[in-house]
Image (tube, rainbow, N blue to C red):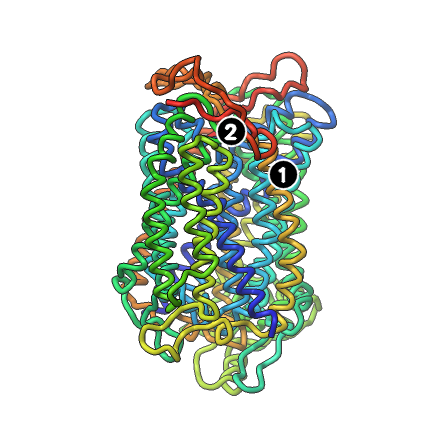
Amino acid sequence: MAFVPLWFILITILWTGFFVLEGFDLGVGMLHAAVGKDETGRRAVINTIGPLWDGNEVWLVVAGAAIFAAFPGWYATLFSGFYLAFVLLLVALILRGVSFEYRGKNPERRWRQTWSALLVVASLLVPLVIGIALGNLLSGTPINSHQEYAGSFWDLFRPYPILAGVTLVAICLMHGGTFIAMKTDGAVRVRAGRVARRMAPVTALLVLAFISWTHVQAGGGAFLNPVELLACIAVIAAGFLAWDRREGWAFAATALTIAISVVAVFVDLYPRVMVSSINPAYDLTVHNTASPPYTLKVMTVVALVLLPIVLGYQAWSYYVFRKRITGETFRPQPTRTAAPVPVPTTPGPATTGPGAQHRRGWGLPGGWRRPRGPRR
Amino acid sequence: MRTDLARWQFAFTSINHFLFVPVTIGLAVLTALLQTAWYRRKQPEYLRLTRFFGTLLTINVAIGVVTGLVQEFEFGMNWSSYSRLVGNIFGAPLAMEGLAAFFLESTFLGLWLFGWDKLSRRVHLATIWLVAFGSVLSAAFIMAANSWMQHPVGYVRNPVTHAPELNDIWALFTNPVFVWSYAKVVLAALVTGAAVMLAVSAWQLRRGGDRAVFGRSARLALVVLVPAILLAMLVGDELGVIEAKYQPMKIAAAEAQWTTCQPCSFSLIQIGGGNNDHTPTQLLSIPHLLSLLATNHWNGKVIGMSPLQAQYAARYGAGNYVPDVFIQYWGMRVMAYLAVVVVLVGLWGLWLNRRRKLATSRRFLWVATWMVILPFLINTAGWLLTESGRQPWIVQGIMLTKNGLSPSVSATELWISVIVFVLLYGTLGTVDLLLMLRYSRKELGPAPPGSDTDTDKPVPAMLY
């Protein structure tokens, strides 16, 4: 039955798309307070993803719904089994979504600080919880012969899943850093670049540890498989590119890192979708959880027609908003409690001043082909 | 106990979700109309209105999206046995909804909000229409899924496991319950959006807002509101006939009709008639009206709940197949009576508009402001009628609600999630309402200087 593996691949693609796109949104959410520093900077940082984050989050909605339609057994066991974790995830997603929207709707300082704080915490929780859940799929949870989860909330917190969660948070931070550096200018850009560079060694170590442990969890041989190897190469490349201030390429490399790390888990999982720690015979697999062929056939047609269209208009929207965002746009915003701070469009104290070298960047198309960030 | 908690949670989260959804759909369409008017007539009033109501739209979209996420997760979290059994059917329209509608809606909303100075006027106008189209389309898929629970079609039983399996996807979208209830949901959304626009315009006019501007939006709202509510009532009537055919128990309960009648009179108001009282005291009733509503025939027959209960028990085994009659009876009446009030207020407004007194009649403006509450009550009553009327089934004739529950979720976990959602929704609902009020009462942004084509500066409130 060819539709079953095809749907596993499609779901892998949907989750990968979610992490690549929402990954930097989450990083931006976590970093916006620190990297933005003042109100003008924070608004500039948030507005780098302003038109995009909602569309990115739909990838999660679709990934969840695709599991529901294609593998109802997997959806049922996963969502009811990891119950409280998903409650926490929903709370974080809800707070994140509304803080984007509500934060700018009231100029009071306390209002903005509250939503900023919620945005930071919620953006941290989302990759942490999803990472822990993802880790648990592979490392195994107590699933009984009726395909039901028989453990408790605390059973989810074991070393490997926690490492998966922490690694995902780290990649999102670095991914967000490279994204902000690529999409802003001035002091914000400098600070974001610095975050990406400082996160590079930490992220690299975490990804290497995570990939090795994933390999062991999956019971692989002495050598890493090509996907696992690629993840390691991508994260190291991302580190070097960030250090070399090649912003566009660094972003591409962090995107690749997060994509391949997720793909690695799914590759090592297949054909299982949730491992049972009680008995390998109770493992949920693509075969014992899949919908009947007719549903998969219908959904294949729908997905193959619609996904390219979706990718097309999402790409167009990225193209429309390709320009770097500066604080300029936000300066006229009157605030009652805090006077707007001058916009750091000129290099701040962290740069070498007007004499900073601007070498031509190379590679990525459109507005991304910009001078590299100034050297510190 | 667990069933009750899960049901309360679903009722609470879905009723809340549907406070925001119709505002989003309705305002998206109305905002698109305003922008079209600006695009064609180039009057700056329409541009100011587009931006004003666009801001209200975005405040709502955010919370509509996140509460929708809860709905999607809830099927798996609380109703895993249901999801496992019918996911291959029910999950399909849900996945299509995401692929076809949510991507469209959210991506183009971003383009519309942030694209004022980046897109040409024509393309920018297209983006708001795609937002409106996406939101109307999303309702189609979720209503197809819901209608399948009311009247399952397009499936066969697996010969071995006896589980229902999808065998005809088109049947889900040609299901008569779907066709009529979808039309009704879209019309209800237009009514809700128009009522919000009318109320905000009326409030502004009462406070000396610009008549040239808010007179226009009040007129547009009325022109959409009156036909939409009249059509919604007609569609609702036809839906009643269809439901009487496929879910006779729902309609019998909505009329508190315990015994079979022919012809049947419609009870306008009565005392008693609940689940433990089979002989209600009629205070007012209209002869033949129920026959007409439920069957489209002057002397149509409506089977009572007691014979239906006997029929169901014989077919599906012993058990109670009667829904909560109190909710059904009053849900139906709240919905119908309040709709009549909306129609009357709408006609009053149109009459004033003809006499060119719409922007000045203080009495009407006061009534129109407060009327905004009614569509929300009507929508909630309508959903209670539909969903509570299906009980005790989660899928009519296929699975009982109590059997759809997640076996692995404890009562404690359900309590935790109920409390978390109630607190979170309570807080966010309040914040949303305050923000809506704040922005509704905001003075309109200044007219764009110079020509009517000046769109260079985005309105700050629209940025984050």
For the N terminus of chain A, the quadrant is: bottom right
Instruction: Say few, some or many: other residues with alpha carbon within 10 Å of mark 1 (under 14 / 14 to 19 / 20 or more).
Output: some
Amino acid on which disc 1 is placed: Trp
**A226 or B265, nearer to the observer:** A226
Q: Secondary structure at mark 1?
A: helix
The subunit letter for the residue under badge 2 reads: B
Residue B36 in view in this figure = yes
Give residue A134's position: percent from left, percent from top: 39, 59
Residue A119 in view in this figure = no
Residue B232 against residue A290 in the figure, above or below: above
Residue A124: mark in rendering: none
Mark 2 lies on residue: B462
Instruction: Say few, some or many: other residues with alpha carbon within 10 Å of mark 2 (under 14 / 14 to 19 / 20 or more).
Output: some
Instruction: Specify the farthest residue to the right.
Output: B40
The subunit letter for the residue under badge 1 reads: A
**A318 or A237, nearer to the observer:** A237
Mark 1 lies on residue: A316
Residue B135 against residue B464 in the figure, above or below: below
**B21 or B225, nearer to the observer:** B21
Residue B114 against residue A155 in the figure, above or below: above
Give residue B321's position: percent from left, percent from top: 47, 77
Instruction: Specify the farthest residue to the front.
Output: A222
Amino acid on which disc 2 is placed: Met
Q: Quadrant of residue B319?
A: bottom left
Q: Secondary structure at mark 2?
A: helix
Please indicate whether residue B250 sits to the left or right of residue B126 in the image: left
Residue A193 against residue B179 in the figure, above or below: above
Residue drawn where x is 69% and y is 33% of the image: B123
Give residue B81's position: percent from left, percent from top: 44, 72
**A111 or B231, nearer to the observer:** A111
